[in-house]
Image (cartoon, rainbow, N blue to C red):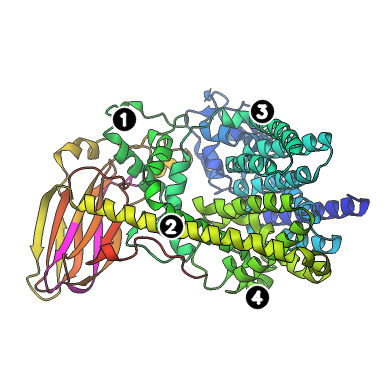
Amino acid sequence: MKKIDVALGIMFWLVGMTLGISVLLQSGSLFFYQTFTPEVVYSACGYGFGHPDIVPARLLAFLFRETVTFNCSDLDPRTNLNAPGLFSLSQFYFSLATALLWRISLVSYQNLWPLVGVLTGLYAAGCFVLLRQFFSRLLATIGAGLLTTSPVTLPIVVLFRDYSKAAFFIWAIAFMLLALRSRQFAALIGWTAASGLAIGIGAGFRADIIILLPVGVLTLVIVFNRKLLLRRLMAVAVMVAVTVVAAFPILSNGKGGSYGSLIMQGMSEPFRLYLKMDPAPYSFGARYSDELVLSSVAADARNDHPDWDMNEGKPVYGVSQATILSGASWQRFFPFFVGDFATQAFKSAGFIVGFPILAADNAAPDPGYPVMQGPPISIWMAPVYSLIAQLWSPWLGLAGLYVFFWTIWSRSRQDAIALGFLFGCLATYPVAQFSIRHVFHLEFIWICALLAILNFPAVFGVIKRSGWSYAAVVATFSVLALSTYIVVLHRQERLLRREFEMLLAQPRELISQQSSVAENSPIRFDVPVPASYEQLVASPADSMTPAIASIGIQWDVRSSADRLLLTFSGSGCVGQMSLSLVYKKRDDVWQPFDEQMKIVLDGAGEGTHVLIPSFYRPTQYLSSITLDQLPLLCSASLERIQGNTVFPALMTAILSPGWRHRALRVGFGKF
């Protein structure tokens, strides 16, 4: 890299730093889940990195951003401090950096400006370094300028823990690219070690960056030369070792399996709507809810763990078995929904490739954080994004990526395949939970596509000679991928058809049966609490109450569930009705499970079956089901299904007459 490139990198670091600090100053405060980490303030005030028995009211006010400064004299020096809590250890380097800055200055959100400046500057400089490996100095400068001033990315600075991983992510990718192109063994080892170090340190700010380790390892071992493969294997061993050592404080506190709860939340209706996918006859929850998902996991696992309640964790230091077992819970039903998962992955990639469309006026609400909403300095480029936030953005991005990889193919087929794998993984892994706060750092993929189009006239004369071979490989891969996708969809529908038939064939216990006494009269089904659940619903609250806002990690989840079947039958069952699930709630309920469903009846065949979960928790339980109307000559029966199924407890389904011959999958939808 020449001196002018170094100078440009420094310039972008300064610009990024200035913009990041300006966002902090205009917003007045940052959110980094500090309500869960009072240890940071105690450490900054010189009392040690520990968690108090009770967090003082004035400190809580500061952590909840009701005030923007805190006076250490408000802490009682006699306070007993315990070991640091699990959440503060999960972002250990972030916690230490914050505590150090406040220790040498004052405990104030605006005194975090050095950390904000360093990370936003590193992100901007890293974007330039990454793009410079593919494009001319001019194009890399244009692309890095767009990334540095992005009105989608800059507002995320306010969510500082989510933003903090971006710099480490970009630099880890940049170091991987340098390793791919290294011809000297020493350079290969150095760049892979640097990439591992970026991943390991980044995991101490936000742990999900660790996904880059397996992706990077697989990318680096895509080689066609045996001697080079041996060198790469040694290099990735170094990369893994450096990552593990750097991330050890975080990895040593991890709980395996917790990824399942994140993926299950990402399968809920808000994420489907955000990705504009067509609905299936079933859903995995009407809301983005920790309580719903963990209650489902706990209910499904409770019978297999008779000592569940005794084995739950403790506040601040424990993790519920529901979180730990969520991975196994997801794996149990995942084989039946592989097609849906693939569809969601492809749709996620489409939005990444056409990144500006996330800012379109007709975009669905983001389940995690609103797009392009932040301090004025963070969204001054919003009008530019609005101009290109069009339906053709994904197709333009796809065309750009075709040219991008064509250019690489003309130089090195090995690199093109390796980078194709890398970019493919990066574009699809957000399938777990597609929200702007989880994908903003992938904006460089869209920029690479855009710059490739701008660069096309300059490189066409060179790359045209490899056009036929490249097109043949792309066509072959596309046909194989599409064929596999179609086979997976057909297999899913076959498996689901069989599983739903088995579920409907299970023994049932009748709860109530009602018919309409007048045209379109409302109906109410009371759902009595089974005797086996009475002790559970009368027990003290578990961890999922509003108090979780100052603790963070669910340590105790107690839940049971039944699967109810509501069947409509009769020649008069025609039209649309609204069904409401009404939960009896205590004052300390956290995320209510009440839900409304629209049901369309057509009066044909065996009738319409509605599969409904009925949860029983200490803070809430299903008490009644109401219908806004029930036509004459139409009866409705509510039954409790006996027996087991692979479906998670939270799943709902509406099986209309003829459902066996209808699509049992989500649709790709539109952009």
Local crowd at mark 4 within 10 Å, few (<14), some, or many (≥20)?
few
Q: Which residue is mark 3?
A: 245
Q: CA distance from mark 3 to mark 4?
A: 46 Å
Q: Describe the element under mark 1 as helix, strand or loop.
A: loop
Tell me the tag on residue 487.
Answer: 2
Local crowd at mark 2 within 10 Å, few (<14), some, or many (≥20)?
few
Q: Earlier in the sequence, mark 2 or mark 3?
A: 3
Principal secondary structure, stretch drawn in magenta: strand
Q: Which residues are magenta?
A: 566-589
Local crowd at mark 3 within 10 Å, few (<14), some, or many (≥20)?
some
Verify CB contact (< 8 Å) between mark 1 and mark 4. no
Q: What's the residue type where badge 3 is placed?
A: Val
Q: CA distance from mark 2 to mark 3?
A: 42 Å
Q: Nearer the viewer, mark 2 or mark 4?
A: 2
- Using the rendered view, name the quadrant where residue 25 is placed: bottom right
Q: Which residue is mark 1?
A: 308
